[in-house]
Amino acid sequence: MIQFTNVKKTYDSNLTEALHDISFVIEDGEFVFLVGPSGSGKSTILKLITAEERITSGGILVGDYDLATLKPRKIPYLRRTLGVVFQDFRLIENRTVRGNLEFVMRVVGSSNKTIRERIPYVLDLVGLSEKAECFPNELSGGEQQRVAIARALVNNPKTIIADEPTGNLDPERSYELMCLLEKINQLGTTMLVVTHERDLVNCFNKRVISIDNGRVISDMENGLYDYETI
């Protein structure tokens, strides 16, 4: 679960207000789109969830973690419950697909047995079983993004946060990627997808939280992303 309660976030010694009185709850197993124009506060929300930034006031719960009181030494444990997918992939270029996944598993102390069993399963799930020994520069953009999703998924997080995951892909690849995220969600992983792509959002019957000027302006089950409302 992710719960924001009257969250306020300011920068520059309280002169710049990025978020104002933000409240919402994302239950375990939900698939939610977070949408809004550039500068609306979407990135700030993600930085708060991952504890990259601290709230100014209000409360945030991410699973069992209270982010208002979370000690710095506990932040790595919080982040192990989250998988993050970035628009620019951020793969390690001198490691194979398998090597990229193995790296993040070893960081959290996974055993050799767990690594041997988990990586083939995840690569099969994202449709890249035959690309395990390829390097990132040998893959298409869509394939690289699937590796990024596999990397986010490989440590079995409770929640995956996808930050503009289709920003570098054409419409057909974007739709395929979103179908993959939907499939992963159906297996039980909570999914939060940040995007500004209206047509893509409107292809899926999901909850849509709309942000503008640091405020939640709509929160609709099975909603549509309508630019005229934000």
Image: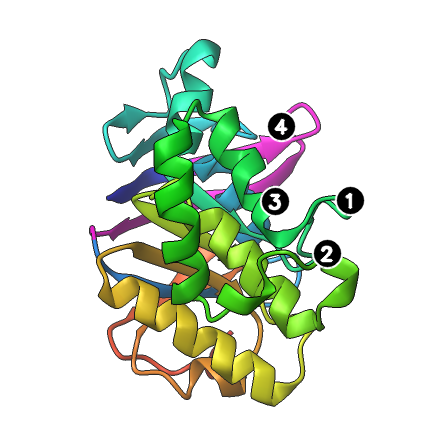
Find residue 190 and report its horizontal and vertical position in percent: 29, 54
The residue where tag 2 is placed is 135
Q: Which mark is residue 84?
A: none
Mark 4 Cα-neighbour bin, 10 Å: few <14, some 14–19, many ≥20: few
Foreground tag (4 vs 3): 3
Q: Residue 94 carries which label?
A: 1
Find residue 25 and report its horizontal and vertical position in percent: 25, 50
217 lies above or below 85: below
Dot placed on the residue nearer the N-terminal end, 3 or 1: 1
Find residue 221 and report its horizontal and vertical position in percent: 24, 73
In this rendered view, identify the residue nearer to me: 30 or 94.
94
The residue where tag 4 is placed is 14
Quarter occupied by the N terminus: top left
Mark 2 and mark 1 in contact (Cβ < 8 Å)?
yes
Mark 3 Cα-neighbour bin, 10 Å: few <14, some 14–19, many ≥20: many
Dot placed on the residue nearer the N-terminal end, 1 or 2: 1
The residues colored magenta run 8-28
Find numbered disc 1 in the image and state the secondary structure of the residue it sits on: loop
Dot placed on the residue nearer the N-terminal end, 4 or 3: 4
Find numbered disc 3 in the image and state the secondary structure of the residue it sits on: helix
The answer to if 61 sits in the magenta stretch is: no
Mark 1 and mark 3 in contact (Cβ < 8 Å)?
no
Dot placed on the residue nearer the N-terminal end, 3 or 2: 3
Q: What residue type is labelled 4?
A: Asn
Can residue 48 be seen at all in this image of the molecule? yes
Mark 2 and mark 4 in contact (Cβ < 8 Å)?
no
Q: Which amino acid does label 3 sit on?
A: Asn
The residue where tag 3 is placed is 100
Find numbered disc 2 in the image and state the secondary structure of the residue it sits on: loop
